Image (spheres, rainbow, N blue to C red):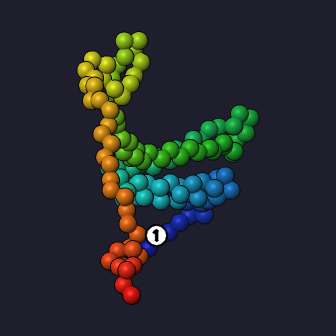
Amino acid sequence: MELEISKDGFIAALRTLEGGALIEELDRGLIECVQAIQERGGKAEIKLSIMVGRIPGTATAVSVSSDVVTKVPKEDRSSKVLFVTPGYGLTHQHQEQEEFDLGLPLVQKTAPLTPVSHIGVDNNVG
């Protein structure tokens, strides 16, 4: 079936609204929706509203405006468990958790290192 576009119909009006910027905005919105569902899943939506109103005092002119709203799935955001402080603030450390005194860290003593050039060399050989 061949599509016939009239010279004074909907598509022609879209081309003239905002100097063609409306069609570009719809195009970018569609790309944004497809990218969002490919990356995050879910569903996306584009809404085009065309408002047509009479202009008082004229017989043949109307005012036409538009609005485009794009709704895409939100990105997943991480969450973190925080604990309520007595003053109703938040902290990452549990307030009623006991603290354990684990003492000071142990210091390990290591033997002095011998350079590789000195290993297995007998200085008394003659």
Q: What residue do we see at 27% from left, 17% from top?
A: 96
Between 11 and 67, the one lying in front of the other is 67
Report the residue that reaches farthest toward the bottom: 126
Q: What residue do we see at 41% from left, 58% from top?
A: 34
Residue 62 image offset from top left, x and y in percent: 66, 43
Looking at the picture, does residue 7 appear above or below residue 92?
below
Amino acid bearing label 1: Leu
Residue 25 in the figure: left or right of residue 45: right
Residue 101 image offset from top left, x and y in percent: 28, 25
Between 63 and 113, the one lying in front of the other is 113
Q: Secondary structure at mark 1?
A: loop
Task: Choose top left, top right, bottom left or bottom right for residue 126.
Answer: bottom left
Residue 89 in the figure: left or right of residue 64: left
Residue 106 in the figure: left or right of residue 32: left
Residue 73 visible from this viewpoint:
yes
Q: What residue do we see at 44% from left, 45% from top?
A: 71
Between 13 and 33, the one lying in front of the other is 33
Q: Residues within 10 Å of mark 1 (few under 14, many from 20)?
A: few
Report the residue that reaches farthest toward the right: 57
Residue 50 in the figure: left or right of residue 17: left
Residue assigned mark 1: 3
**Which quarter of the image is occupied by the N terminus?**
bottom left
